[in-house]
Image (cartoon, coloured by chain):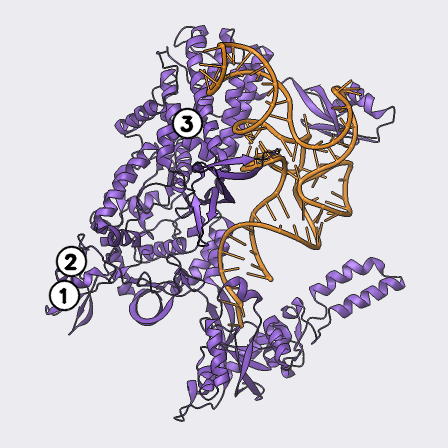
Chain colours: A purple, B orange
Amino acid sequence: MIWTQRIGCRNMQDKYNPTQIEQAAQAHWNKAQSFKAERVAGKPKYYCLSMFPYPSGKLHMGHVRNYTIGDVLTRWHKMRGYNVLQPMGWDAFGLPAENAAIKNGVPPAKWTWDNIAYMKKQLQSLGFAIDWERELATCSPSYYKWNQWLFLRMLDKGIAYKKTQVVNWDPVDQTVLANEQVIDGCGWRTGALVEKREIPGYYFNITGYADELLSALDHLPGWPERVKTMQANWIGKSYGVRFAFTHDIRDEQGTLLDDGKLWVFTTRADTIMGVTFCAVAAEHPLATLAARNNPALAAFIEKCKQGSVMEADVATMEKEGMPTGLSVTHPLTGEAVPVWVGNYVLMSYGEGAVMAVPAHDERDFGFAKKYDLPIKQVIDAGVSLEFSSKLAEESRWLGNEKGRAEIAEAFESIKFSAEHWDAWYAEKDGVCVNSGKYDGLNYEQAVDAIAADLKAKQHGDKKVQWRLRDWGVSRQRYWGCPIPIIHCEQCGDVPVPDDQLPVVLPEDCVPDGSGNPLLKRDDFLKCACPKCGQPARRETDTMDTFVDSSWYYARYASRRSNDAMVDDETNYWMPVDQYIGGIEHAILHLLYSRFWSKVMRDVGLVSYDAPRAEPFAHLLTQGMVLNHIFSRRTDKGGIEYYAPDSVDMQHDAQGRISGATLRDDGKPVDYQGIGTMSKSKLNGVDPQALIEQYGADTARFFMMFASPPEQTLEWSDAGVDGAYRFLRRVWAFGHLFQTELSGLIGKAGAARELTSAKLPSELAGLRREMHLLLKQANYDLGKQQFNTVASSCMKMLNALEKAPRDSALAAEVIEEGLSILLRVLSPITPHIAHALWAELNFGEDILQAAWPEPLEAALVQDELELVLQIAGKTRGSVRVPASADKAAIEQLALASETAQRYMEGKPAKKVVVVPGRLVNIVV
RNA sequence: GCCGGGGUGGCGGAAUCGGUAGACGCAGCGGAUUCAAAAUCCGCCGCCAGUGAUGGUGUGGGGGUUCGAGUCCCCCCCCCGGCACCA
């Protein structure tokens, strides 16, 4: 029996008072330890994780949305019998704390801990079903100790290593950036132009895991396709051949450059016989050499280096180049091949040089046309896919002259031409021509043969090329996890022994913007070498904060492990069943976490999801929260923004926004449309004000109702009012039920069983509607489409409010319906559901109630209403007995008044009957 | 340029297998209640024509498949997100 019976009734307030009921519900959950997660046998586990926040000061709407989604899933699973874990913590290291310190003179530690305390209160006031006993902050030594510990294991295994490399230096933040932190040549955080610097630092060999990180994507059906695509593109695996053109190019001292080899990488080795020139990047040594005595070339190279790196520009950029005057020797033909500098060749990918085959590469083609270089066709894709499809398209014209002419024309249009470029020239399904001994070979055969020949001459071989680079983790910052290394003049770089971990970061430093304050802290800096005992110096670089967030999910899962990074409980909870966060982490954080999880596996720490050790089974990327943007041009030509609640909007007759004025001065402001809530545009809405005015349930309901989780969400004050209005009506209906209806129901505690058979049709209809809505809500929950779950709840209330209230039977049907509504509502608005469930005596705690499932008996009906279409147009409906078969339905439909009217005496050509749906009479 | 995701009323958004397009909400309009207002309740609400019954039309545009298309196929336009000039 899933239908909870009420036992008696208490007196309840007639007004919805969110503050009061929310505090009471939260107090109840605290006292009952409702969300404490323990290992439980015999129940499936459900680990629901939302990306932890950076403690920036206060919660923003994006957090509220993110955590409400997670909470709905958590509570829904809990009520369905899962053993759930929903933890929360703080991504607490990072630059904003240092910036705040520079500004206010407060130590980053104090600033961070104060923010955590405040934001924790905010989170608690939203009523999330979080197991707070598992809370962690990445800036606490008990957490980052294990960053250091695993770093040392990685050092042991060669996964972490030190090297000096040209790095991306952010001149504003005074720190090194990873390749992926450089966006369009600028720092991802500061937007400052990134410089190149040579600095020693520690790297993680993520490229050693590239293959696994790529192939395991195929085993993540619970991830959005686009995130997997983004990761695959980022890893960027390509198969090809790396080979060298030989040369005898020497510098002024007569030294042979690069051992006389110009290396290139190509995925189209089958076109090697079509090479008519080589192109090198502006930064390539050959280019540098050639430019020494060639001012024009030097100028061109300089121009290339400064050229735009914006993708949009780059993709449409004119291919430009300049000859170096140098030439190299083709390894197979022995021909001299001129070397050009090309602005479309990137030093950072492959060898920084390419073989150019203008006939079969669009960029090379454009380049060759522009500079009048030879174009040599070496692939014949004559009967290609392109051709077959054109032939198929045109084949119906075969047999007449026009048709033949069209086919001839089609054929002509796909013939290789040195005059214009066609995309299919680059197809791989042709065969080699004009290629000597390789003539007639297809792509694979040609690549194999050519690679073998190059290998025999020791001029090259097949190679897999990756775009992914190793992960540089050293940061010249204070507020981060210290890298556990000691520099000794005698012994070099010595790892800190395990028993001296953690290397604790002093918490009383106040950065002043002049570099890392640790450099001035002798108590931190000075130490004894663990090997020889002589005075030594501690490493002052700290780790990239992406390290902190790469394994917090595993730490939550092993709450009690003080003497290990994680314990066996991690294998119970992991992998995370549902991970929820912003799309902005699609590449970096998620890739690093996947890498880290595999490293933890290889160190023997974890064994979940063997053999792949993927940390996140399902991923939901929630959309951003948007709001209107208003601005004015200032006298100086800048832009000043105004908060949406400080302007009045005007609407035209159609209801569209036609203008807006600032309330302060009544003068117009520019409406900039809708965009992400941001501090700079002043269009953020403070969750705190919202909670104080309407309560957490209203905030949560609006967030869920306004749009599906993956889509953007447009803020709407009126929408919030609507959510509040709905909850007031829910409360009012609960009150009405208690005062007017509960008394009608038979004596307290008596077992009541509703069967559709004995219900009058109106009540049977209501009951059926409630169960149908429940069925819909359950289906939508499964799709994680919470906006329609919320509307189902609204429809349920609408139905209940319209129901007759004049009999014990009616009261019982309403009672059942209300019990369904409260339970479906409870994951979204847990406080009001909790309060009404207890007030109306459905039970002590709605969290303990079983999730409702629709009853088949309530869904059956005697008569169905089918849509009636005549000649494909909907003309009305026809009522038929539920038991009627197709033939009977057809008879009833044809005999119906509507059909008679619209058929106008014409005979039915055909009758389509879709049982349970419609009848279409074709005339 | 390439790869994703989209385009449905005044707005946010529904429509599960191809089966009554516009659920639910917001805004708007009309009414009830009220001394009045707020709150609440009732009704209307895609567009065009019509007093109305009703008819026509309608899911970015154009074709197609089908008894029937927002949904499937082809072509085109526009918007959003991502990116790799990746050899």
- The residue tagged with tag 3: helix, strand or loop? loop
Residue A585: % across, % down: 41, 52
Nearer-N-terminus badge (1/2): 2
- The residue tagged with tag 1: helix, strand or loop? loop
Residue A916: % across, % down: 67, 26
Res A826 label: 3
Nearer-N-terminus badge (1/3): 1
Is there any visible trace of residue A896 in the rendered image? Answer: no
Nearer to me, A156 or B40: B40
Q: Label 1 sits on what residue type? A: Pro
Q: Answer whether labels 1 and 2 touch (C-beta < 8 Å).
A: yes
Q: Label 3 sits on what residue type? A: Ser
According to the picture, the residue beneath numbered tag 2 turns out to be A500
What distance separates the C-alpha of mark 1 from that of mark 2? Answer: 10 Å
Closest to the camera, between mark 1 and mark 3, is: 3
Q: Answer whether labels 3 and 2 touch (C-beta < 8 Å).
A: no
Nearer-N-terminus badge (3/2): 2
Q: Is residue A860 above or below residue A568?
A: above
Question: Is residue A903 toward the left or the right of residue B34 in the image?
Answer: right
- The residue tagged with tag 2: helix, strand or loop? helix
Nearer to me, A726 or A236: A726
Question: Do discs 1 and 2 share a chain?
Answer: yes
The picture quadrant where one finds residue A868 is top right
Nearer to me, A177 or A647: A647
Q: Is residue A648 above or below residue A491?
A: above
Q: Label 2 sits on what residue type? A: Gln
Determine the residue positioned at 65% across, 67% down.
A423
Which quadrant is the N terminus of chain A positioned in? top left
Residue A625: % across, % down: 45, 42
Determine the residue positioned at 55% across, 24% down.
A772
According to the picture, the residue beneath numbered tag 1 turns out to be A530
